[in-house]
Amino acid sequence: MGEVSPHLGVEAKLARWGRAVVVVVLVVAALDWVGWATGVEGLTRVYLAWPQMVPWSALWLVGLAVAILVQTGQPSRRRVWAGRGLAMMVGACAVVVLAEYVSGRSLGLDQMWFGEAVRTLQSTWPGRPSPLTASSVLILAAAVALTRVDRRWTCVVWSVCVMGAGAIPCFGVVAYVFGSMRLVGVTPSTGMAISTAVAVLLLVVATLVARPDRPPLAWLLARPDGVALLRLYGLAITFVFLVALSRLTFLGLGRSQNAAFSLSLVVGTVLAVSVGFRLRNQEQSLLKDRADAEMRYHILANNAVDIIVHLRGSRVVWISPSVEVAFGGPPKQWIGSGFRLRIHPDDLDTLANALHRITNGDSVLQRFRVRSFDGRYHWVDGHGKPYMDAEGNVDGLIAALRIADDRVKAEQQLERLARFDTLTGLANRAEAISRLESALAQPPANGAHLGILFCDIDHFKTINDTWGHGIGDTVLATLAARVSESVRHGDTVGRTGGDEILVVLPGVHSIDEVARIGEQIRRRAAEPIHQSGTTIHATMSIGATIADPGESVASITARADAAMYQAKSSNRNTVIQVEPARLPRPIAR
Protein backbone atom coordinates (compact mmCIF):
# COMPACT_ATOMS: atom_id res chain seq x y z
CA MET A 1 0.00 0.00 0.00
CA GLY A 2 1.30 3.13 -1.13
CA GLU A 3 1.91 6.11 1.27
CA VAL A 4 0.11 9.50 1.05
CA SER A 5 2.40 12.47 0.50
CA PRO A 6 2.41 14.78 3.54
CA HIS A 7 3.04 17.87 1.37
CA LEU A 8 0.22 17.65 -1.19
CA GLY A 9 -1.32 20.94 0.00
CA VAL A 10 2.04 22.76 -0.04
CA GLU A 11 2.81 21.45 -3.52
CA ALA A 12 -0.57 22.63 -4.80
CA LYS A 13 0.10 26.12 -3.43
CA LEU A 14 3.57 26.14 -4.99
CA ALA A 15 2.09 25.10 -8.34
CA ARG A 16 -0.32 28.06 -8.19
CA TRP A 17 2.53 30.45 -7.37
CA GLY A 18 4.55 28.99 -10.25
CA ARG A 19 1.71 29.64 -12.70
CA ALA A 20 1.33 33.20 -11.38
CA VAL A 21 5.06 33.82 -11.91
CA VAL A 22 4.83 32.50 -15.48
CA VAL A 23 1.93 34.86 -16.18
CA VAL A 24 4.02 37.82 -14.93
CA VAL A 25 6.84 36.86 -17.30
CA LEU A 26 4.42 36.58 -20.21
CA VAL A 27 3.07 40.05 -19.42
CA VAL A 28 6.60 41.54 -19.25
CA ALA A 29 7.52 39.94 -22.59
CA ALA A 30 4.29 41.14 -24.20
CA LEU A 31 4.86 44.70 -22.99
CA ASP A 32 8.39 44.60 -24.42
CA TRP A 33 7.07 43.68 -27.86
CA VAL A 34 4.45 46.41 -27.58
CA GLY A 35 7.21 48.88 -26.75
CA TRP A 36 9.23 47.89 -29.84
CA ALA A 37 6.14 47.97 -32.04
CA THR A 38 4.94 51.39 -30.83
CA GLY A 39 8.29 53.03 -30.18
CA VAL A 40 7.55 53.50 -26.46
CA GLU A 41 11.09 53.12 -25.14
CA GLY A 42 9.95 53.00 -21.49
CA LEU A 43 8.41 49.56 -22.13
CA THR A 44 11.73 48.12 -23.33
CA ARG A 45 14.01 49.36 -20.52
CA VAL A 46 13.79 50.96 -17.07
CA TYR A 47 16.41 53.73 -17.45
CA LEU A 48 17.81 55.26 -20.64
CA ALA A 49 21.32 54.36 -19.48
CA TRP A 50 20.38 50.69 -19.13
CA PRO A 51 20.02 48.16 -21.97
CA GLN A 52 16.67 47.21 -23.51
CA MET A 53 15.12 43.78 -23.57
CA VAL A 54 15.46 42.96 -27.26
CA PRO A 55 12.60 41.15 -29.09
CA TRP A 56 14.54 37.88 -29.27
CA SER A 57 14.98 37.86 -25.48
CA ALA A 58 11.24 38.42 -25.02
CA LEU A 59 10.49 35.58 -27.45
CA TRP A 60 12.84 33.22 -25.56
CA LEU A 61 11.18 34.12 -22.27
CA VAL A 62 7.74 33.38 -23.72
CA GLY A 63 8.96 30.01 -25.05
CA LEU A 64 10.45 28.99 -21.70
CA ALA A 65 7.42 30.29 -19.79
CA VAL A 66 5.06 28.16 -21.88
CA ALA A 67 7.40 25.15 -21.63
CA ILE A 68 7.37 25.44 -17.84
CA LEU A 69 3.62 26.02 -17.70
CA VAL A 70 2.69 22.88 -19.66
CA GLN A 71 4.92 20.73 -17.40
CA THR A 72 3.62 22.06 -14.09
CA GLY A 73 1.31 19.93 -11.94
CA GLN A 74 0.37 16.51 -13.34
CA PRO A 75 1.03 16.90 -17.08
CA SER A 76 0.19 14.29 -19.69
CA ARG A 77 2.92 12.66 -21.75
CA ARG A 78 1.99 14.82 -24.74
CA ARG A 79 2.30 18.02 -22.70
CA VAL A 80 5.67 16.91 -21.33
CA TRP A 81 7.07 16.32 -24.80
CA ALA A 82 5.64 19.62 -26.05
CA GLY A 83 7.30 21.54 -23.23
CA ARG A 84 10.54 19.62 -23.66
CA GLY A 85 10.62 20.33 -27.40
CA LEU A 86 9.90 24.03 -26.88
CA ALA A 87 12.71 24.32 -24.32
CA MET A 88 15.12 22.60 -26.69
CA MET A 89 14.21 25.05 -29.48
CA VAL A 90 14.91 28.02 -27.19
CA GLY A 91 18.21 26.42 -26.13
CA ALA A 92 19.19 25.91 -29.78
CA CYS A 93 18.54 29.62 -30.51
CA ALA A 94 20.73 30.59 -27.55
CA VAL A 95 23.51 28.36 -28.87
CA VAL A 96 23.28 30.12 -32.26
CA VAL A 97 23.59 33.55 -30.62
CA LEU A 98 26.60 32.46 -28.55
CA ALA A 99 28.20 31.03 -31.71
CA GLU A 100 27.68 34.38 -33.44
CA TYR A 101 29.49 36.18 -30.62
CA VAL A 102 32.38 33.69 -30.67
CA SER A 103 32.77 33.77 -34.47
CA GLY A 104 32.11 37.50 -34.85
CA ARG A 105 29.61 36.79 -37.61
CA SER A 106 25.89 37.35 -37.93
CA LEU A 107 23.35 35.01 -39.50
CA GLY A 108 21.01 37.93 -40.14
CA LEU A 109 18.35 36.77 -37.67
CA ASP A 110 18.99 39.58 -35.16
CA GLN A 111 16.77 42.07 -36.93
CA MET A 112 13.92 39.78 -38.05
CA TRP A 113 11.53 41.83 -35.93
CA PHE A 114 11.44 45.62 -35.60
CA GLY A 115 14.71 45.97 -37.58
CA GLU A 116 14.56 49.74 -38.00
CA ALA A 117 13.82 50.30 -34.32
CA VAL A 118 16.65 48.11 -33.05
CA ARG A 119 19.12 49.69 -35.48
CA THR A 120 18.15 53.12 -34.21
CA LEU A 121 18.33 52.32 -30.49
CA GLN A 122 21.33 49.95 -30.46
CA SER A 123 24.74 50.89 -31.84
CA THR A 124 26.33 47.40 -31.78
CA TRP A 125 24.80 44.03 -32.62
CA PRO A 126 21.31 45.51 -32.92
CA GLY A 127 18.57 43.08 -31.94
CA ARG A 128 20.89 40.38 -30.64
CA PRO A 129 20.50 39.20 -26.97
CA SER A 130 23.61 39.72 -24.83
CA PRO A 131 26.04 36.86 -24.09
CA LEU A 132 24.88 36.89 -20.45
CA THR A 133 21.26 36.54 -21.56
CA ALA A 134 22.05 33.75 -24.03
CA SER A 135 24.12 31.86 -21.43
CA SER A 136 21.49 32.01 -18.68
CA VAL A 137 18.67 31.14 -21.13
CA LEU A 138 20.67 28.17 -22.47
CA ILE A 139 21.24 26.77 -18.96
CA LEU A 140 17.61 27.39 -17.99
CA ALA A 141 16.38 25.72 -21.20
CA ALA A 142 18.39 22.63 -20.27
CA ALA A 143 16.75 22.60 -16.81
CA VAL A 144 13.26 23.00 -18.29
CA ALA A 145 13.90 20.18 -20.78
CA LEU A 146 14.95 17.90 -17.87
CA THR A 147 11.99 18.82 -15.65
CA ARG A 148 10.09 15.58 -16.29
CA VAL A 149 13.05 13.29 -16.96
CA ASP A 150 13.22 10.91 -13.99
CA ARG A 151 16.53 9.14 -14.10
CA ARG A 152 19.27 8.69 -11.56
CA TRP A 153 21.49 11.45 -12.92
CA THR A 154 18.83 14.02 -13.86
CA CYS A 155 18.09 15.18 -10.30
CA VAL A 156 21.64 16.45 -9.77
CA VAL A 157 22.04 17.87 -13.30
CA TRP A 158 18.64 19.56 -13.10
CA SER A 159 19.45 21.18 -9.74
CA VAL A 160 22.84 22.42 -11.00
CA CYS A 161 21.26 23.88 -14.16
CA VAL A 162 18.54 25.67 -12.18
CA MET A 163 21.05 27.18 -9.76
CA GLY A 164 23.41 28.13 -12.59
CA ALA A 165 20.62 29.75 -14.60
CA GLY A 166 19.65 31.84 -11.57
CA ALA A 167 23.19 32.91 -10.62
CA ILE A 168 23.87 34.97 -13.78
CA PRO A 169 20.74 37.20 -13.71
CA CYS A 170 20.92 37.46 -9.90
CA PHE A 171 24.46 38.85 -10.15
CA GLY A 172 23.28 41.21 -12.88
CA VAL A 173 20.34 42.55 -10.85
CA VAL A 174 22.62 43.24 -7.86
CA ALA A 175 25.07 45.05 -10.18
CA TYR A 176 22.24 47.18 -11.56
CA VAL A 177 20.74 48.26 -8.27
CA PHE A 178 24.13 48.99 -6.69
CA GLY A 179 25.47 50.83 -9.73
CA SER A 180 28.23 48.30 -10.50
CA MET A 181 27.36 47.57 -14.15
CA ARG A 182 31.00 47.38 -15.13
CA LEU A 183 31.34 44.19 -13.07
CA VAL A 184 29.08 42.43 -15.55
CA GLY A 185 30.18 44.24 -18.68
CA VAL A 186 26.85 46.03 -19.14
CA THR A 187 26.63 48.64 -21.88
CA PRO A 188 23.50 50.40 -23.09
CA SER A 189 23.45 48.43 -26.36
CA THR A 190 24.73 44.93 -25.54
CA GLY A 191 24.14 44.34 -21.83
CA MET A 192 21.60 42.11 -20.17
CA ALA A 193 18.49 44.18 -19.51
CA ILE A 194 17.32 44.29 -15.90
CA SER A 195 13.82 43.28 -17.03
CA THR A 196 15.34 40.24 -18.74
CA ALA A 197 17.33 39.38 -15.62
CA VAL A 198 14.27 39.66 -13.38
CA ALA A 199 12.17 37.60 -15.82
CA VAL A 200 14.82 34.85 -15.96
CA LEU A 201 14.92 34.78 -12.15
CA LEU A 202 11.13 34.42 -12.07
CA LEU A 203 11.32 31.53 -14.54
CA VAL A 204 13.97 29.88 -12.36
CA VAL A 205 11.50 30.06 -9.47
CA ALA A 206 8.73 28.60 -11.66
CA THR A 207 11.04 25.74 -12.70
CA LEU A 208 11.85 25.00 -9.07
CA VAL A 209 8.21 24.80 -8.00
CA ALA A 210 7.38 22.61 -11.01
CA ARG A 211 9.36 19.83 -9.27
CA PRO A 212 9.10 20.36 -5.51
CA ASP A 213 10.23 16.76 -5.00
CA ARG A 214 13.76 17.70 -6.10
CA PRO A 215 16.42 19.68 -4.24
CA PRO A 216 16.51 22.34 -2.99
CA LEU A 217 12.73 22.55 -2.42
CA ALA A 218 12.51 18.88 -1.41
CA TRP A 219 15.16 19.46 1.24
CA LEU A 220 13.37 22.56 2.49
CA LEU A 221 9.93 20.93 2.61
CA ALA A 222 11.32 17.94 4.48
CA ARG A 223 12.61 20.13 7.32
CA PRO A 224 10.27 20.88 10.23
CA ASP A 225 11.64 24.45 10.27
CA GLY A 226 11.17 24.94 6.53
CA VAL A 227 8.78 27.89 6.95
CA ALA A 228 11.17 29.63 9.35
CA LEU A 229 14.05 29.15 6.91
CA LEU A 230 11.99 30.60 4.08
CA ARG A 231 11.26 33.65 6.18
CA LEU A 232 14.94 34.01 7.05
CA TYR A 233 16.03 33.79 3.41
CA GLY A 234 13.27 36.15 2.36
CA LEU A 235 14.31 38.67 5.00
CA ALA A 236 17.95 38.56 3.86
CA ILE A 237 16.99 39.09 0.19
CA THR A 238 14.52 41.80 1.13
CA PHE A 239 17.25 43.66 3.05
CA VAL A 240 19.52 43.71 0.01
CA PHE A 241 16.82 45.04 -2.28
CA LEU A 242 15.61 47.57 0.28
CA VAL A 243 19.11 49.00 0.50
CA ALA A 244 19.44 49.05 -3.31
CA LEU A 245 16.06 50.70 -3.94
CA SER A 246 16.60 53.19 -1.14
CA ARG A 247 19.97 54.09 -2.64
CA LEU A 248 18.40 54.75 -6.04
CA THR A 249 15.70 56.85 -4.39
CA PHE A 250 18.20 59.01 -2.50
CA LEU A 251 20.32 59.44 -5.61
CA GLY A 252 17.20 60.59 -7.43
CA LEU A 253 16.67 63.15 -4.65
CA GLY A 254 20.13 64.60 -5.35
CA ARG A 255 22.14 63.03 -2.54
CA SER A 256 25.79 62.14 -3.05
CA GLN A 257 26.91 58.54 -3.57
CA ASN A 258 28.22 58.18 0.01
CA ALA A 259 25.21 59.86 1.59
CA ALA A 260 22.78 57.81 -0.49
CA PHE A 261 24.53 54.59 0.45
CA SER A 262 24.61 55.44 4.17
CA LEU A 263 20.97 56.50 4.23
CA SER A 264 19.92 53.39 2.30
CA LEU A 265 21.71 51.19 4.86
CA VAL A 266 19.82 52.95 7.67
CA VAL A 267 16.46 52.56 5.92
CA GLY A 268 17.11 48.92 5.00
CA THR A 269 18.27 48.07 8.51
CA VAL A 270 15.29 49.78 10.20
CA LEU A 271 12.78 48.09 7.92
CA ALA A 272 14.49 44.70 8.14
CA VAL A 273 14.67 44.90 11.94
CA SER A 274 11.00 45.94 12.12
CA VAL A 275 9.89 43.10 9.87
CA GLY A 276 12.18 40.65 11.67
CA PHE A 277 10.84 41.74 15.07
CA ARG A 278 7.27 41.25 13.89
CA LEU A 279 8.04 37.85 12.42
CA ARG A 280 9.86 36.91 15.60
CA ASN A 281 6.84 37.82 17.72
CA GLN A 282 4.61 35.78 15.47
CA GLU A 283 7.06 32.89 15.66
CA GLN A 284 7.22 33.12 19.47
CA SER A 285 3.42 33.18 19.69
CA LEU A 286 3.20 30.14 17.43
CA LEU A 287 5.90 28.34 19.40
CA LYS A 288 4.11 29.09 22.68
CA ASP A 289 0.79 27.84 21.30
CA ARG A 290 2.52 24.75 19.93
CA ALA A 291 4.29 24.11 23.23
CA ASP A 292 0.99 24.40 25.12
CA ALA A 293 -0.70 22.10 22.63
CA GLU A 294 2.14 19.58 22.84
CA MET A 295 2.01 19.65 26.65
CA ARG A 296 -1.73 18.96 26.64
CA TYR A 297 -1.22 16.32 23.99
CA HIS A 298 1.50 14.54 25.99
CA ILE A 299 -0.61 14.65 29.16
CA LEU A 300 -3.49 13.03 27.28
CA ALA A 301 -1.21 10.53 25.54
CA ASN A 302 0.56 9.52 28.76
CA ASN A 303 -2.71 8.99 30.60
CA ALA A 304 -4.68 7.42 27.77
CA VAL A 305 -6.03 3.91 28.22
CA ASP A 306 -6.03 3.30 24.48
CA ILE A 307 -2.89 3.01 22.39
CA ILE A 308 -2.65 5.83 19.84
CA VAL A 309 -0.53 5.02 16.79
CA HIS A 310 0.37 7.13 13.75
CA LEU A 311 1.22 5.11 10.63
CA ARG A 312 2.59 6.00 7.21
CA GLY A 313 1.81 2.98 5.11
CA SER A 314 2.65 0.20 7.57
CA ARG A 315 5.51 2.05 9.29
CA VAL A 316 5.01 3.34 12.85
CA VAL A 317 5.74 7.09 12.93
CA TRP A 318 4.60 7.68 16.52
CA ILE A 319 2.95 5.63 19.26
CA SER A 320 1.67 6.66 22.67
CA PRO A 321 3.48 5.66 25.89
CA SER A 322 0.49 3.50 26.85
CA VAL A 323 1.84 0.86 24.45
CA GLU A 324 4.42 -0.19 27.04
CA VAL A 325 1.74 -1.23 29.54
CA ALA A 326 -0.39 -2.94 26.91
CA PHE A 327 2.18 -4.77 24.79
CA GLY A 328 5.52 -4.26 26.51
CA GLY A 329 8.53 -2.47 25.12
CA PRO A 330 9.03 1.32 25.19
CA PRO A 331 7.63 3.45 22.33
CA LYS A 332 11.09 3.92 20.79
CA GLN A 333 11.21 0.19 20.01
CA TRP A 334 7.96 0.49 18.06
CA ILE A 335 8.67 3.73 16.17
CA GLY A 336 10.21 3.15 12.76
CA SER A 337 9.26 -0.54 12.68
CA GLY A 338 6.74 -2.21 10.39
CA PHE A 339 3.37 -2.55 12.12
CA ARG A 340 2.41 -5.51 9.93
CA LEU A 341 5.24 -7.55 11.48
CA ARG A 342 3.32 -7.62 14.77
CA ILE A 343 -0.04 -8.66 13.29
CA HIS A 344 -1.27 -12.26 13.49
CA PRO A 345 -0.78 -13.94 10.07
CA ASP A 346 -4.48 -14.84 9.88
CA ASP A 347 -5.43 -11.16 10.25
CA LEU A 348 -3.05 -9.65 7.66
CA ASP A 349 -5.51 -9.65 4.77
CA THR A 350 -8.30 -8.23 6.91
CA LEU A 351 -6.03 -5.45 8.17
CA ALA A 352 -4.75 -4.71 4.65
CA ASN A 353 -8.34 -4.18 3.48
CA ALA A 354 -9.01 -1.89 6.43
CA LEU A 355 -5.88 0.18 5.71
CA HIS A 356 -6.90 0.47 2.06
CA ARG A 357 -10.32 1.81 3.07
CA ILE A 358 -8.69 4.35 5.39
CA THR A 359 -6.40 5.44 2.54
CA ASN A 360 -9.56 6.14 0.53
CA GLY A 361 -10.79 8.43 3.30
CA ASP A 362 -13.02 6.10 5.32
CA SER A 363 -13.17 5.82 9.10
CA VAL A 364 -12.85 2.12 9.93
CA LEU A 365 -13.49 -0.10 12.96
CA GLN A 366 -11.61 -3.40 12.84
CA ARG A 367 -10.71 -6.21 15.25
CA PHE A 368 -7.38 -8.03 14.88
CA ARG A 369 -4.56 -9.56 16.91
CA VAL A 370 -1.28 -7.86 17.84
CA ARG A 371 1.80 -9.66 19.15
CA SER A 372 3.24 -8.24 22.36
CA PHE A 373 6.92 -8.27 23.28
CA ASP A 374 6.46 -11.51 25.27
CA GLY A 375 5.28 -13.30 22.11
CA ARG A 376 1.61 -13.55 23.04
CA TYR A 377 -1.14 -12.26 20.78
CA HIS A 378 -3.79 -9.90 22.11
CA TRP A 379 -7.11 -9.04 20.49
CA VAL A 380 -7.53 -5.31 19.89
CA ASP A 381 -10.38 -3.16 18.61
CA GLY A 382 -8.87 -0.57 16.28
CA HIS A 383 -10.54 2.65 15.14
CA GLY A 384 -8.56 4.21 12.31
CA LYS A 385 -8.99 7.22 10.04
CA PRO A 386 -6.80 9.45 7.83
CA TYR A 387 -4.35 11.62 9.79
CA MET A 388 -4.48 15.33 8.96
CA ASP A 389 -1.46 17.47 9.83
CA ALA A 390 -1.52 21.09 11.01
CA GLU A 391 -1.83 22.35 7.42
CA GLY A 392 -4.75 20.05 6.61
CA ASN A 393 -2.69 17.63 4.52
CA VAL A 394 -3.17 13.86 4.73
CA ASP A 395 -0.14 12.30 6.45
CA GLY A 396 -0.86 8.58 6.72
CA LEU A 397 -3.42 7.39 9.26
CA ILE A 398 -4.04 7.49 12.99
CA ALA A 399 -5.65 4.71 14.99
CA ALA A 400 -6.81 4.13 18.55
CA LEU A 401 -6.23 0.55 19.71
CA ARG A 402 -7.96 -0.93 22.76
CA ILE A 403 -7.17 -4.34 24.23
CA ALA A 404 -10.25 -6.56 23.70
CA ASP A 405 -9.11 -9.94 25.12
CA ASP A 406 -11.79 -10.01 27.83
CA ARG A 407 -14.48 -8.86 25.40
CA VAL A 408 -13.50 -11.47 22.81
CA LYS A 409 -13.46 -14.18 25.48
CA ALA A 410 -16.92 -13.15 26.70
CA GLU A 411 -18.27 -13.05 23.13
CA GLN A 412 -16.82 -16.50 22.43
CA GLN A 413 -18.42 -17.84 25.60
CA LEU A 414 -21.76 -16.33 24.63
CA GLU A 415 -21.45 -17.81 21.17
CA ARG A 416 -20.62 -21.20 22.64
CA LEU A 417 -23.58 -20.98 24.98
CA ALA A 418 -25.79 -20.18 22.04
CA ARG A 419 -24.55 -23.17 20.04
CA PHE A 420 -23.40 -25.82 22.52
CA ASP A 421 -24.85 -27.65 25.50
CA THR A 422 -23.21 -26.50 28.73
CA LEU A 423 -23.37 -29.92 30.47
CA THR A 424 -22.11 -32.22 27.74
CA GLY A 425 -20.21 -29.84 25.46
CA LEU A 426 -22.15 -31.25 22.50
CA ALA A 427 -23.91 -29.11 19.92
CA ASN A 428 -27.30 -28.05 21.23
CA ARG A 429 -30.54 -28.88 19.45
CA ALA A 430 -30.59 -25.74 17.26
CA GLU A 431 -26.96 -26.20 16.20
CA ALA A 432 -27.37 -29.91 15.51
CA ILE A 433 -30.53 -29.37 13.42
CA SER A 434 -28.79 -26.51 11.56
CA ARG A 435 -25.88 -28.78 10.66
CA LEU A 436 -28.29 -31.52 9.59
CA GLU A 437 -30.12 -29.05 7.33
CA SER A 438 -26.81 -27.94 5.84
CA ALA A 439 -25.76 -31.56 5.20
CA LEU A 440 -29.11 -32.34 3.55
CA ALA A 441 -28.74 -29.29 1.30
CA GLN A 442 -25.38 -30.49 -0.02
CA PRO A 443 -25.57 -32.49 -3.23
CA PRO A 444 -24.60 -36.10 -2.39
CA ALA A 445 -21.36 -37.44 -3.80
CA ASN A 446 -21.48 -40.42 -6.10
CA GLY A 447 -22.35 -43.49 -4.02
CA ALA A 448 -22.41 -41.53 -0.72
CA HIS A 449 -25.32 -41.03 1.69
CA LEU A 450 -26.16 -39.06 4.80
CA GLY A 451 -26.53 -41.26 7.86
CA ILE A 452 -28.47 -40.50 11.06
CA LEU A 453 -28.24 -42.07 14.53
CA PHE A 454 -30.76 -41.32 17.28
CA CYS A 455 -29.42 -42.37 20.70
CA ASP A 456 -31.30 -42.53 23.99
CA ILE A 457 -30.02 -43.60 27.44
CA ASP A 458 -31.84 -46.64 28.78
CA HIS A 459 -33.55 -46.24 32.17
CA PHE A 460 -32.09 -42.76 32.63
CA LYS A 461 -34.96 -41.74 34.92
CA THR A 462 -34.17 -44.71 37.16
CA ILE A 463 -30.50 -43.62 37.33
CA ASN A 464 -31.55 -40.12 38.41
CA ASP A 465 -34.04 -41.47 40.96
CA THR A 466 -31.54 -43.98 42.37
CA TRP A 467 -28.30 -42.02 42.43
CA GLY A 468 -29.50 -38.44 42.25
CA HIS A 469 -29.37 -35.85 39.52
CA GLY A 470 -25.69 -35.08 40.18
CA ILE A 471 -24.72 -38.65 39.28
CA GLY A 472 -27.26 -38.52 36.45
CA ASP A 473 -25.51 -35.49 34.99
CA THR A 474 -22.17 -37.27 35.26
CA VAL A 475 -23.56 -40.30 33.45
CA LEU A 476 -25.00 -38.11 30.71
CA ALA A 477 -21.73 -36.17 30.25
CA THR A 478 -19.69 -39.40 30.23
CA LEU A 479 -21.90 -41.07 27.62
CA ALA A 480 -21.83 -37.90 25.50
CA ALA A 481 -18.03 -37.98 25.54
CA ARG A 482 -18.02 -41.70 24.61
CA VAL A 483 -20.35 -41.04 21.67
CA SER A 484 -18.05 -38.25 20.45
CA GLU A 485 -15.04 -40.57 20.73
CA SER A 486 -16.78 -43.29 18.70
CA VAL A 487 -17.65 -41.26 15.58
CA ARG A 488 -15.44 -40.04 12.74
CA HIS A 489 -13.79 -36.67 12.33
CA GLY A 490 -16.30 -34.30 10.76
CA ASP A 491 -19.38 -36.03 12.15
CA THR A 492 -21.81 -34.01 14.28
CA VAL A 493 -22.92 -35.11 17.75
CA GLY A 494 -25.67 -33.02 19.34
CA ARG A 495 -27.90 -33.18 22.42
CA THR A 496 -31.47 -32.67 21.21
CA GLY A 497 -33.33 -33.38 24.46
CA GLY A 498 -32.86 -34.49 28.06
CA ASP A 499 -31.05 -37.79 27.35
CA GLU A 500 -31.38 -37.88 23.56
CA ILE A 501 -28.33 -37.55 21.31
CA LEU A 502 -28.41 -37.02 17.55
CA VAL A 503 -25.47 -38.10 15.38
CA VAL A 504 -25.13 -36.84 11.78
CA LEU A 505 -22.86 -38.98 9.58
CA PRO A 506 -22.14 -37.44 6.16
CA GLY A 507 -20.43 -39.48 3.44
CA VAL A 508 -21.46 -43.01 4.48
CA HIS A 509 -21.83 -45.65 1.75
CA SER A 510 -24.67 -47.74 3.15
CA ILE A 511 -27.02 -48.13 6.05
CA ASP A 512 -24.89 -51.04 7.22
CA GLU A 513 -21.97 -48.59 7.73
CA VAL A 514 -24.30 -46.38 9.77
CA ALA A 515 -25.29 -49.40 11.86
CA ARG A 516 -21.64 -50.35 12.42
CA ILE A 517 -20.88 -46.88 13.80
CA GLY A 518 -24.00 -47.16 15.98
CA GLU A 519 -22.75 -50.53 17.26
CA GLN A 520 -19.41 -48.97 18.19
CA ILE A 521 -21.28 -46.32 20.15
CA ARG A 522 -23.47 -48.92 21.85
CA ARG A 523 -20.53 -51.05 22.99
CA ARG A 524 -18.53 -48.04 24.20
CA ALA A 525 -21.54 -46.64 26.09
CA ALA A 526 -22.14 -49.98 27.85
CA GLU A 527 -18.77 -49.91 29.57
CA PRO A 528 -19.04 -49.39 33.36
CA ILE A 529 -18.94 -45.86 34.77
CA HIS A 530 -17.03 -45.47 38.02
CA GLN A 531 -18.02 -42.44 40.04
CA SER A 532 -17.45 -41.71 43.75
CA GLY A 533 -16.77 -45.35 44.56
CA THR A 534 -19.88 -46.46 42.73
CA THR A 535 -20.07 -48.43 39.50
CA ILE A 536 -22.96 -47.62 37.22
CA HIS A 537 -23.96 -49.63 34.17
CA ALA A 538 -25.73 -47.53 31.58
CA THR A 539 -26.73 -48.56 28.07
CA MET A 540 -28.12 -46.83 25.00
CA SER A 541 -30.84 -47.69 22.49
CA ILE A 542 -29.98 -46.45 19.01
CA GLY A 543 -31.97 -45.98 15.82
CA ALA A 544 -30.09 -45.85 12.50
CA THR A 545 -31.17 -44.71 9.04
CA ILE A 546 -30.00 -42.88 5.93
CA ALA A 547 -31.58 -39.94 4.14
CA ASP A 548 -33.22 -40.00 0.75
CA PRO A 549 -32.06 -37.19 -1.62
CA GLY A 550 -34.23 -34.13 -1.01
CA GLU A 551 -35.71 -35.52 2.21
CA SER A 552 -36.68 -33.04 4.92
CA VAL A 553 -35.19 -32.80 8.40
CA ALA A 554 -38.52 -33.67 10.01
CA SER A 555 -38.90 -36.82 7.92
CA ILE A 556 -35.45 -38.26 8.55
CA THR A 557 -35.39 -37.44 12.28
CA ALA A 558 -38.85 -38.96 12.71
CA ARG A 559 -37.68 -42.20 11.06
CA ALA A 560 -34.53 -42.36 13.19
CA ASP A 561 -36.56 -41.59 16.30
CA ALA A 562 -39.02 -44.38 15.43
CA ALA A 563 -36.10 -46.81 15.01
CA MET A 564 -34.74 -45.76 18.42
CA TYR A 565 -38.11 -46.37 20.10
CA GLN A 566 -38.29 -49.71 18.39
CA ALA A 567 -34.93 -50.56 20.01
CA LYS A 568 -36.21 -49.42 23.41
CA SER A 569 -39.40 -51.43 23.10
CA SER A 570 -37.45 -54.62 22.46
CA ASN A 571 -34.44 -55.60 24.54
CA ARG A 572 -32.88 -52.07 24.77
CA ASN A 573 -29.10 -51.71 24.51
CA THR A 574 -29.37 -52.43 20.79
CA VAL A 575 -29.17 -50.77 17.37
CA ILE A 576 -32.16 -50.89 15.04
CA GLN A 577 -31.67 -49.79 11.42
CA VAL A 578 -34.54 -48.62 9.21
CA GLU A 579 -34.30 -48.24 5.47
CA PRO A 580 -35.95 -45.11 4.02
CA ALA A 581 -39.20 -45.57 2.11
CA ARG A 582 -37.78 -45.17 -1.39
CA LEU A 583 -39.95 -44.02 -4.30
CA PRO A 584 -40.37 -46.47 -7.20
CA ARG A 585 -38.04 -45.84 -10.08
CA PRO A 586 -39.69 -44.67 -13.30
CA ILE A 587 -39.99 -47.31 -16.00
CA ALA A 588 -37.85 -46.62 -19.09
CA ARG A 589 -39.77 -46.36 -22.30
Image: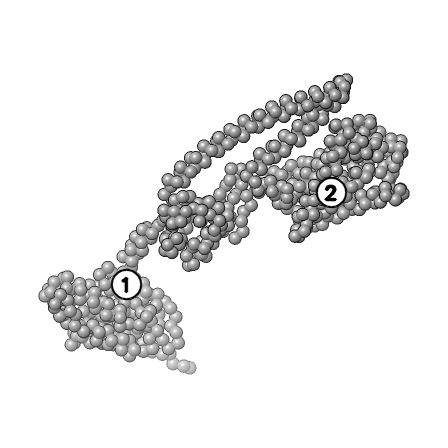
Q: Is residue 55 left or right of residue 554?
A: right
Foreground residue among 473 and 51: 51
Residue 140's disc is 2
Q: As displayed, is residue 236 above or below residue 311?
A: above
Q: Is residue 31 left or right of residue 212?
A: right
Q: Earlier in the sequence, mark 1 or mark 2?
A: 2
Identity of the residue drawn at 39% across and 53% down: 373
Q: Residues within 10 Å of mark 1 (few under 14, many from 20)?
A: many
Identity of the residue drawn at 60% across and 40% down: 220
Quadrant in the rendering for residue 191: top right
Foreground residue among 255 and 299: 255
**Residue 397 image position (x, y, % from top left):** 48, 46
Q: Is residue 468 left or right of residue 273?
A: left
Q: As displayed, is residue 180 above or below residue 301?
A: above
Foreground residue among 8 and 241: 241
| SS assignment at label 2 | helix
Q: What type is the residue that disc 2 sits on? A: Leu
Which tag is nearer the camera, tag 1 or tag 2? 2
Q: As displayed, is residue 91 above or below residue 578?
A: above
Identify the image quadrant of the C terminus.
Answer: bottom left
| SS assignment at label 1 | loop
Read off the residue under disc 1: 427
Q: As displayed, is residue 550 above or below residue 92?
A: below
Find the distance from the CA under tag 1 to the CA under tag 2.
80 Å
